[in-house]
Amino acid sequence: MMRTSITAAVVLAATPALAGETVRYEVDGTAYEGYLAQPAGAPAGLVLVIHDWDGLGAYEERRADMLAQLGYAAFAADLYGAGNRPQATAAKKAETAALYDDREAMRARILGGLATARGQVGDLPAVVMGYCFGGAATLELARSGAADDVVAYTTFHGGLATPEGQSWEGVEAFVLVAHGGADGAITLDDVAQLGRELEAAETAYEIQIYSGAPHAFTVFGSDRYRERADRQSWNAFTDLLAERLGG
């Protein structure tokens, strides 16, 4: 397993409407800033949330709060670095391209977030999930086998392609894919290809496709948001959490 150097400290989140805390931590000497939300009682498990291409923001914090309300500890990890929240499209593309080109760094940052979360909440069973770029990053970690204590992975409208030299062979954790049928960025052919790979590797999986849902269909307030697809995919995900983590 890849090893990283991690330190962390918790401070109160600045936004009173949010239930969680900002967590400042380091991975291999670089500063990162995540977000931790915890339930009132003992958590049933841990959910690691991986952000979209614009970095960790209010969207991921809201999802973490929603998970805490369901009884799970949720940690939204930071893959870009503290204060790095790109606004321009070109900057977002540059950040994701850098990690797609250096997948070892991508995995190290996810593992650093996971280790930081465990340092705050203890050695709980974990599920990793992500949105768009975060979904692709989630599958990257799943294929690597670097986190053998993660029981399931979930991608929402994320990239699905398996890079050359990687495969799903030996992956024992469950994989849930939530995808929009009208996604123009990641096609149904891409979905079918992933299904074939998972089937051939005998990796346990479920793929859900939501008719009429475009790319990024879960993003609240956007013109791509589709309430039905968001609700159904969230229900599928929380059913998975109940099955794999309890609660």
Image (cartoon, rainbow, N blue to C red):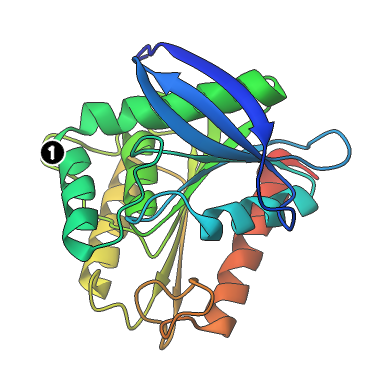
Nearer the observer, 5 or 178? 5
Nearer the observer, 225 or 197? 225
Q: Residue furthest right?
A: 41
User: Residue 234, position in %: x, y?
Assistant: 61, 65
Secondary structure category for the residue under label 1: helix
User: Residue 114, position in %: x, y?
Assistant: 51, 28
Specify the quadrant of the image occupied by residue 45.
top right
- Residue at point 55%, 19% (across, down): 8
Type of amino acid at the residue the image marks with label 1:
Asp
Query: Which image quarter is the N terminus in?
Result: top left
Residue 159 sits above or below residue 211 on the image: above
User: Residue 98, position in %: x, y?
Assistant: 16, 41
- Residue at point 66%, 43% (across, down): 13
User: Residue 211, position in %: x, y?
Assistant: 43, 86
Q: Which residue is mark 1?
A: 101
Specify the quadrant of the image occupied by residue 106.
top left
